[in-house]
Image: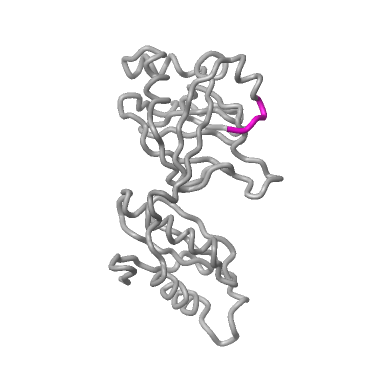
């Protein structure tokens, strides 16, 4: 177990070409800030041997290219040494460094076919579900599952709803869903089992852009309702 800025972390191999920096076992605000601080350091000062880094709820995986190291040197041990040195210079991300993104959502109807089911399951009216879902602030904990898909924390427990028993074969891009105590937005058309309560006209993933994903870990997200007419007017627009 190593220490960085009086905080502990653990390094371990992840397969034969990656190292895991684990900050703890449970997701919390302190660990989230430390992960984002390390991610920012890797973004600004990438290792020459780094292929990519992947933040998660409690850790960061760093994938490395073993051919970038000198002959006779253990790629893992050398990468581990350099990561340890990096962590001594890494501080948790401060609150004022987080970005806030507002995302419009057309709730219900053809854009949110599962809204009524979620409302009935939770003992709410559809309008109450919309108000609760759009009334809070969310945090992007990680991007995964599909390119640009944000796993968001902060959804009210009162509108938590289980996944579908049978996943849908085709979820439109921009669909906003609920699964258990989480909410998220499908950035591309894909199969999925989340309860779809709405859809945003804002593209969350565009492969030709740099970066291709609109959102990143650490972003603060707020949703606000729009009408079907506004949805069609803004289709393909930006937040």
The furthest residue to the left: 6
The furthest residue to the front: 96
- Residue at the location (47% across, 40% down)? 100
Judge whether residue 149 is colored magenta: no
Q: Which residues are magenta?
A: 235-239
The furthest residue to the bottom: 72
Across and down, in percent, residue 179 comes to: 41, 31
Closer to us: 28 or 93: 93
Q: How many marks?
A: 0
Across and down, in percent, residue 129 comes to: 39, 19
Closer to us: 62 or 98: 98
Q: Which quadrant would the N terminus be assigned to in this image?
A: bottom left
Q: Is residue 223 left or right of residue 67?
A: left
Closer to us: 176 or 130: 130
The image shows residue 40, relative to residue 102, as above or below, that is below
Closer to us: 29 or 119: 29
- Residue at the location (53% across, 40% down)? 149
Q: Is residue 110 left or right of residue 31?
A: right
Instruction: Check the image and tell me how it is coloured.
Output: one colour
Q: Quadrant of residue 93?
A: bottom left
Across and down, in percent, residue 170 comes to: 60, 28
The image shows residue 30, relative to residue 181, as above or below, that is below
Q: Which quadrant would the C terminus be assigned to in this image?
A: top right
């Amino acid at each position: 177990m190593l220490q960085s800025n009086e905080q502990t972390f653990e390094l371990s191999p992840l397969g034969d070409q990656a190292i895991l920096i684990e900050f703890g076992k449970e997701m919390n605000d302190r660990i989230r800030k430390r992960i984002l601080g390390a991610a920012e350091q890797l973004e600004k000062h990438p290792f020459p041997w780094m292929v990519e880094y992947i933040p998660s709820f409690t850790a960061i995986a760093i994938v490395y290219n073993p051919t970038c190291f000198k002959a006779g040197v253990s790629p893992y041990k050398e990468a581990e040494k350099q990561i340890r040195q990096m962590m001594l210079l890494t501080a948790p991300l401060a609150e004022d460094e987080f970005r806030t993104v507002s995302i419009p959502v057309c709730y219900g109807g053809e854009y949110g076919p599962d809204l009524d089911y979620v409302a009935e399951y939770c003992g709410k009216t559809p309008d109450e579900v919309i108000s609760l879902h759009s009334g809070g602030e969310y945090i992007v904990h990680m991007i995964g599952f599909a390119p640009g898909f944000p796993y968001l924390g902060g959804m009210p427990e009162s509108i938590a709803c289980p996944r579908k028993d049978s996943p849908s074969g085709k979820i439109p891009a921009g669909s906003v869903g609920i699964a258990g105590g989480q909410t998220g937005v499908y950035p591309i058309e894909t199969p999925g089992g989340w309860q779809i309560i709405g859809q945003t006209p804002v593209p969350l993933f565009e492969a030709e852009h740099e970066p291709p994903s609109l959102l990143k870990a650490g972003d603060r997200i707020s949703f606000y309702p729009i009408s079907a007419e506004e949805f069609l007017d803004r289709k393909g627009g930006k937040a």
